[in-house]
Image (spheres, rainbow, N blue to C red):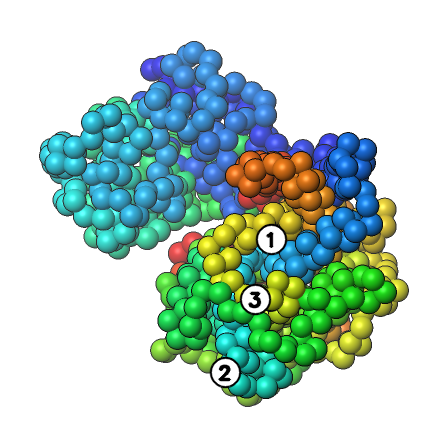
């Protein structure tokens, strides 16, 4: 058997897959150094905290998306779920409900949508891409018809502890950054050390093998999408508290693509089973530095979109280059 | 007469494993040649080379005496070499006419014109198929007609039929053979791949038998009997060396307690009303040709597939009826299936050996602590790696980097870690190197000695004969015969499987 050639090919792949994360990390470092040297005010403490503050919500959403992408799924309804459930909570608070109860209702709505997603994907066997695409539109439409009176719902005058989620600071570090760090730590632990986390990797790597091994694949899918929606809800709370409102028009923005960008850029393959929290952090950092630098340079929003799009495309091409569909390997055993 | 196509010392290797070894063969215009052999003998690979779907590693392909090298099926088609596959290659969502002209539509494509010319063409062939019908609405025989019509539409000079009669009714078969006769008269060469020996002998001019990728015999069909062909198909030297002395002299283990009883099990068109039982402490071998419903029956028992909702039959575990809709409850009850296709549904290719083995433990009925410690993963994996002699640099190596035999051992370890009561091996040594075959066989024997219910499915006769304490033979979705290993021979089993 020509084991040597096979081995060398795969060790080459491993070396490459190591570098995808590394390359993005190096790119982030290079950009950081370049911007620090060339841009006035980039390297200041205030700006760097602001940079972190700006990308922390994106990072939290990226962690949520990573969970399903590792399980070889995707959730395109994430932003819609987040916007509508949080806007509904705000509407309820303004209507006189206590903050706690309003948030509980919003959370139940978000988790309900997630569970419905998971149920449709697992039991009705709809592809995740189509299911969540339709669900996003459905949720947004339903929310605007039945739950919230306007596109933009403002925070109530006295949101109490909820407001601190966006505006508060601990030792000078903004609350959203802390939320991101906490979620990143929690996700690391869950993905690496719990049965739920390992099952997610097994399903993403080989769904059929996971099923035959005895992994409860369908309940797992329902749980995964439920958890994603829950994290999305928290990210929405942080957003609302930071900018004092929830603008549901973000559903129609490119935000969902930014989230996928962060996940794919960091090196979590869309083919599933690979990557982890570190990849999301690296992807978030690169996007954060890039956006912040482009804003300081006063680059137009449309041009920024062009650059982001080009980077996402490059990341996707890279992903398919290092995870190729090898016909020869696929035919093995089919002699 | 000059041969239409001549294969000279053709060899094809997959990852260094030869599928076809040094085969030479000529096919003449207007003749019917049947390619016979067991599963994995290399029939499909050989014909795929003629159709350009597979490029040979070494050797020459001469067409009309000129050397030729097809890189793509399209190129082969342009030279008039067409293949009619077992699973049809038609597009179900298009109409018959669209399928006929697929890939050669004119730039300005008028549907009405397409239907008219398709209608005329089908009439010249005397095919009664409506050109405007969707292929998905056609029956098996009609689909086959469309396939053949498409091949002829490309002015095919050689048509390869892969198991053409498997899905046909007797009347449709009669029709089909009439058509073959007409094609022959027009000078078209026909190659059959078939498991139906009687049929092959009746309609072919010549018979070629392949075994383990090597050419065994080519002779006019009139000079051969069915027994000659079966002998040529099964008599192998290499495996006799490998298996000699295990099966023949060993005393079969007695049957222990009856654990699984399968009654009137049915699933779609693959498993039809089959019944058999499995006992503790012995190896039950199951032999059948591809498509005889062996794998499907096993998958239904293990919950991987669902049996028919109505009249699906019953499965009893220790006398209690069980009905698994997913593999998980079956795994919890100790019934585990080791797949025949380990890449598709066996191992996790991006994960390490250790992680693969531990996956089994994590999903088993045993209590696993809430928090996973990687030292425990390493300990569990190391134990099984030693027990099964998985050869790798370390437990951190990825499974996809291993040889077939070691991959199979990892998949088996992942199953054994779950402490099975009933273990089903589907083609346990497919794509496994010779050394590992012996080790896996030893392991299977050990498991039966330890009192497990072991069910081995295999297309490899020597393997079945050397391992089994009982041999079940399946044909067309049913267990049709049971043999004792001391009285069974390869010929008897093959005879039961093909009739």
Element under label 3? strand
Residue, disc 2: A95
Residue at 31% across / 30% down in the picture? B103
Q: Earlier in the sequence, mark 2 or mark 1?
A: 2
The outermost residue toward the bottom is B320
Element under label 1? helix
Q: Foreground residue, A322 or B393?
A: A322
Q: Percent position (x, y) of residue B212? A: 58, 39
Q: Earlier in the sequence, mark 1 or mark 3?
A: 3
Above or below, A326 relative to B428: above
Above or below, B407 relative to B21: below
Q: Percent position (x, y) of residue B80? A: 33, 23
Q: Percent position (x, y) of residue B375? A: 88, 64
Q: Foreground residue, B290 or B198?
A: B290
Q: State the mark number for residue A259.
A: 1
- Is B178 left, or right, of B364 in this rendering? left
The outermost residue toward the top is B66
Q: Quadrant of the N terminus of chain B?
A: top left
- Same chain assignment for discs 1 and 3: yes
Q: Foreground residue, B266 or B396?
A: B396
Residue at 62% across / 84% down in the picture? A100
Cα distance between the residues tagged 2 and 1: 32 Å
- Same chain assignment for discs 2 and 1: yes
Q: State the mark number for residue A245.
A: 3
Q: Foreground residue, B348 or B183?
A: B348
Q: State the mark number for residue B98.
A: none
């Amino acid at each position: 058997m020509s084991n040597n050639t096979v081995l060398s090919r795969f060790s080459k792949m491993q070396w490459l897959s190591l570098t995808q994360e590394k390359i993005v990390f190096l790119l982030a470092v290079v950009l950081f150094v370049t911007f620090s040297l060339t841009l006035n005010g980039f390297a200041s403490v205030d700006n760097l905290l602001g940079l972190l503050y700006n990308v922390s919500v994106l990072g939290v959403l990226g962690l949520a998306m990573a969970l399903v992408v590792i399980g070889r799924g995707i959730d395109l309804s994430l932003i819609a779920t987040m916007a509508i459930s949080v806007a509904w909570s705000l509407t309820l608070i303004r209507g006189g409900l206590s903050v706690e109860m309003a948030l509980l209702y919003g959370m139940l709505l978000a988790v309900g949508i997630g569970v419905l997603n998971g149920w449709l994907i697992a039991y009705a066997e709809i592809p995740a891409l189509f299911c969540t695409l339709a669900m996003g539109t459905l949720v947004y439409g339903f929310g605007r018809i039945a739950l919230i009176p306007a596109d933009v719902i403002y925070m109530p005058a006295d949101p109490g502890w909820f407001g601190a989620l966006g505006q508060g600071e601990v030792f000078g570090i903004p609350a959203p950054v802390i939320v991101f760090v906490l979620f990143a730590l929690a996700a690391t632990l869950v993905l690496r050390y719990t049965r739920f986390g390992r099952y997610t990797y097994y399903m993403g790597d080989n769904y059929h093998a996971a099923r035959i091994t005895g992994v409860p694949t369908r309940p797992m899918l329902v749980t995964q999408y439920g958890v994603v929606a829950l994290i999305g809800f928290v990210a929405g709370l942080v957003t609302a508290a930071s900018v004092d409102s929830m603008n549901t028009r973000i559903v129609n923005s490119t935000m969902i693509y930014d989230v996928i960008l962060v996940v794919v850029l960091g090196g979590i393959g869309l083919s599933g089973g690979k990557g982890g929290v570190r990849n999301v952090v690296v992807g978030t950092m690169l996007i954060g530095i890039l956006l912040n630098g482009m804003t300081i340079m006063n680059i137009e929003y449309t041009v920024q979109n062009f650059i982001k799009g080009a980077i996402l495309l490059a990341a996707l091409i890279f992903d398919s280059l290092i995870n190729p569909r090898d016909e020869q390997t696929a035919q093995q055993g089919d002699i | 007469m000059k041969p239409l196509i001549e294969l000279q010392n053709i060899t094809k290797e997959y990852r260094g494993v030869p599928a076809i070894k040094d085969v030479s063969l000529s096919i003449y215009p207007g003749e019917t040649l049947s390619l016979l052999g067991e599963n994995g003998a290399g029939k499909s690979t050989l014909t795929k080379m003629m159709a350009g779907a597979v490029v040979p590693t070494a050797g020459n392909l001469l067409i009309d005496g000129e050397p030729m090298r097809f890189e793509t099926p399209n190129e082969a088609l342009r030279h008039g070499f067409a293949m009619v596959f077992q699973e049809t290659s038609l597009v179900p969502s298009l109409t018959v006419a669209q399928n006929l002209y697929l890939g050669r539509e004119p730039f300005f494509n008028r549907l009405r014109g397409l239907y008219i010319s398709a209608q005329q063409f089908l009439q010249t062939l005397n095919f009664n198929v409506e050109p405007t019908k969707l292929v998905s609405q056609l029956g098996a025989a009609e689909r086959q007609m469309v396939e053949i019509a498409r091949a002829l539409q490309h002015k095919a000079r050689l048509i390869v039929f892969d198991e053409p009669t498997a899905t046909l009714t007797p009347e449709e078969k009669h029709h089909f053979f009439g058509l073959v006769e007409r094609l022959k008269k027009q000078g078209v060469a026909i190659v059959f791949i078939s498991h139906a020996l009687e049929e092959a002998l009746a309609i072919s001019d010549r018979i070629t038998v392949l075994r383990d990728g090597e050419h065994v015999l080519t002779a006019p069909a009139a000079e051969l009997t069915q027994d000659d062909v079966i002998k040529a198909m099964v008599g192998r030297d290499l495996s006799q060396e490998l298996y000699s002395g295990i099966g023949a002299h060993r005393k079969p283990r007695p049957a222990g307690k009856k654990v699984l009883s399968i009654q009137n099990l049915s699933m779609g068109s693959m498993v039809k009303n089959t019944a058999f039982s499995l006992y503790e402490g012995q190896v039950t071998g199951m032999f059948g040709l591809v498509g005889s419903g062996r794998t499907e029956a096993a998958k239904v028992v293990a919950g991987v597939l669902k049996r028919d909702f109505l009249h699906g039959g019953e499965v009893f575990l220790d006398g209690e009826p069980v009905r698994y809709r997913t593999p998980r409850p079956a795994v919890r009850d100790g019934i585990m299936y080791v797949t025949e296709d380990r890449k598709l549904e066996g191992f996790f290719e991006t994960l390490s050996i250790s992680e693969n083995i531990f996956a089994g433990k994590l999903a088993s009925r045993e209590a696993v602590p809430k928090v996973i410690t990687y030292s425990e993963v390493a300990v569990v994996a190391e134990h099984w790696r030693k027990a099964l002699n998985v050869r790798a640099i370390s437990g951190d190596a990825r499974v996809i980097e291993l040889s077939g035999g070691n991959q199979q051992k990892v998949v088996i370890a992942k199953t054994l870690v779950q402490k099975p009561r009933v273990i089903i091996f589907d083609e346990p040594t497919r794509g496994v190197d010779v050394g590992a075959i012996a080790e896996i066989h030893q392991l299977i024997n050990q498991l039966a000695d330890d009192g497990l219910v072991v069910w081995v499915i295999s297309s490899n006769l020597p393997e079945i004969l050397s391992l089994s304490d009982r041999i079940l033979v399946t044909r067309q979705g049913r267990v049709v015969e049971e043999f004792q290993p001391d009285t069974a021979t390869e010929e008897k089993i093959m005879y039961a499987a093909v009739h």
